[in-house]
Amino acid sequence: MEALGERLARELRAGDLVLLEGELGAGKTTLTRGIGRGLGARGAVTSPTFVLAREHPTASGPPLVHVDAYRLGSAAELDDLDLDLERSIVVVEWPNDRVDADSWLRLRIERPAAGDPDAEAEPRRVTIDASGARWAPVLNALGS
């Protein structure tokens, strides 16, 4: 998942919104860690579960904003976090019904042996889709 995140990071720019879906332990934060590494993010990229959002300055320019929307009830609550969406690269875990945007890239991560701790090393299946014209070249670059 980290390698995919690093590949994706090469395509991201300020104003991009990346949505990550998948069950607990699917690899959402691991993928975000790869994005952070690809962007040259400072500080450890860890789950923002309790703080809801973490901003990481990057060597590439725009900061990486990592959001865990699991405990949010609506898009209005996400908006209340007052994130700088236009000047940041924003990655949102658990976006279901909590993100109101026209342009986004969504990655759905599935584990083949969901819930089986012995299957942690099993490869994940990632489905990628997008909304907005900005994402066509990104999807091409990722081979989707």
Image (cartoon, grey):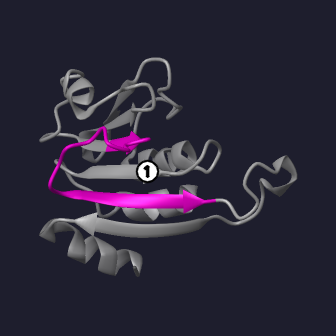
**Residue 32 spot, x, y in % from top left:** 47, 46
Which residue is at the far right? 118
Q: Quadrant of the N terminus?
A: bottom right
Residue appearing at x 39%, y 62% in the figure: 8
Q: Secondary structure at mark 1?
A: strand
The picture quadrant where one finds residue 24 is top right
Answer above or below: position of 19 versus 42: below
Around disc 1, counting alpha carbons within 10 Å, would you say few (fewer than 14), some (14 to 19), or many (20 or more)? Answer: many
Residue appearing at x 87%, y 52% in the figure: 118
Q: Is residue 64 magenta?
A: no
Q: Which residue is mark 1?
A: 20
Relative to the observer, which residue lies in front, 58 or 121?
121
The picture quadrant where one finds residue 86 is top left
Answer above or below: position of 13 versus 127: above
Give the left or right position of residue 62, taking residue 94 as reference.
left
Give the left or right position of residue 98, taking residue 120 as reference.
left
Q: What segment carries the magenta color?
A: 91-110
**Residue 41 spot, x, y in % from top left:** 40, 39
Answer above or below: position of 32 versus 55: below
Relative to the observer, which residue lies in front, 74 or 112?
74
Give the left or right position of residue 23, taking residue 115 as reference.
left
**Residue 128 spot, x, y in % from top left:** 41, 68
Q: Quadrant of the C terminus?
A: bottom left
Residue appearing at x 67%, y 59% in the figure: 111
The picture quadrant where one finds residue 63 is top left
Kindly identify the amino acid type of the residue bearing the numbered disc 1.
Leu
Answer above or below: position of 106 versus 58: below
Residue appearing at x 38%, y 33% in the figure: 67
Relative to the observer, which residue lies in front, 44 or 130?
130
